[in-house]
Image: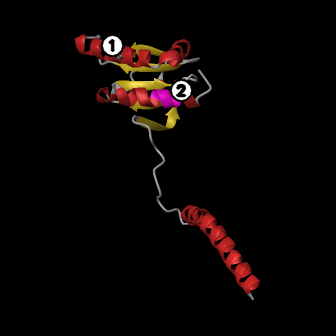
Amino acid sequence: MEGTQKTTSSRLTLWSIWLLALLPLVGAVLAYGLQLPVTSGSINQGELLEPVRPLSHWGGDADRFTGHWTLVLKGDGQCDSDCEQQLERMRSVHDALGRDADRVRVQTVQAPAVPSLGSGIWLVDPYGNLVLHYTREQLGEPLLQDLKRLLKISKVG
């Protein structure tokens, strides 16, 4: 009689553990199947361009913007003192990348050169696609965090 109670208690414990382990899986399947809005899945600080704009669509020069990641500062005309400060901050972000700094280039583009780009900071991937856009206020820590995460994951460039 005592052995039967132990067996029943052991089985109850075993099934409780299995049920507890399966609950997250069942919840995930239900969330996926019912398309519940669990999270946006986006952790980037800049505006992700969906779909990306290939080199041929935004008018960049293939020699300047392929083979490496490029941070592009789009100016409205001649580079004045404000533009120079922005460029210096971009170079500081570039230097803060450490050993990955050689994978990224910093460039400026003026309004007539690439008319299809709006002002701000643009991130171009090694294939020449525009990937992310940042406002000038996001220049600094938000840009640095995104670049570090991107370069850690990316095997190209």
Instruction: Classify residue 41 as left or right of residue 127.
Output: left
Q: Distance between the residues labelled 1 and 2?
A: 21 Å
Residue 84 shows in this picture: yes
| Front residue of this view, candidates 57 and 79 | 79
* Start-end of magenta stretch: 147-151
Colouring rule applied to residues:
secondary structure
Q: Position of residue 134 (x, y in %)?
A: 37, 30
The secondary element bearing badge 1 is classed as: helix
Instruction: Classify residue 79 as left or right of residue 98.
Output: left
- Relative to 16, say whether 49 is above or below: above
Of the 4 image quadrants, the one containing the N terminus is bottom right
Mark 2 crowd level (few <14, some 14–19, many ≥20, 10 Å Cα):
some
| Front residue of this view, candidates 54 and 17 | 17
Q: Which residue is drawn at 23% across and 11% down?
A: 81
Examine the structure image and report whether residue 148 is included in the region drawn in magenta.
yes
Earlier-in-chain disc, 1 versus 2: 1
The three-letter amino acid code for the residue at tag 1 is: Glu
The secondary element bearing badge 2 is classed as: helix
Mark 1 crowd level (few <14, some 14–19, many ≥20, 10 Å Cα):
few
Q: Which mark is residue 88?
A: 1
**C-beta proximity under 8 Å, tags 1 and 2:** no
Q: Residue at label 2?
A: 151
Q: Position of residue 121 (x, y in %)?
A: 38, 24
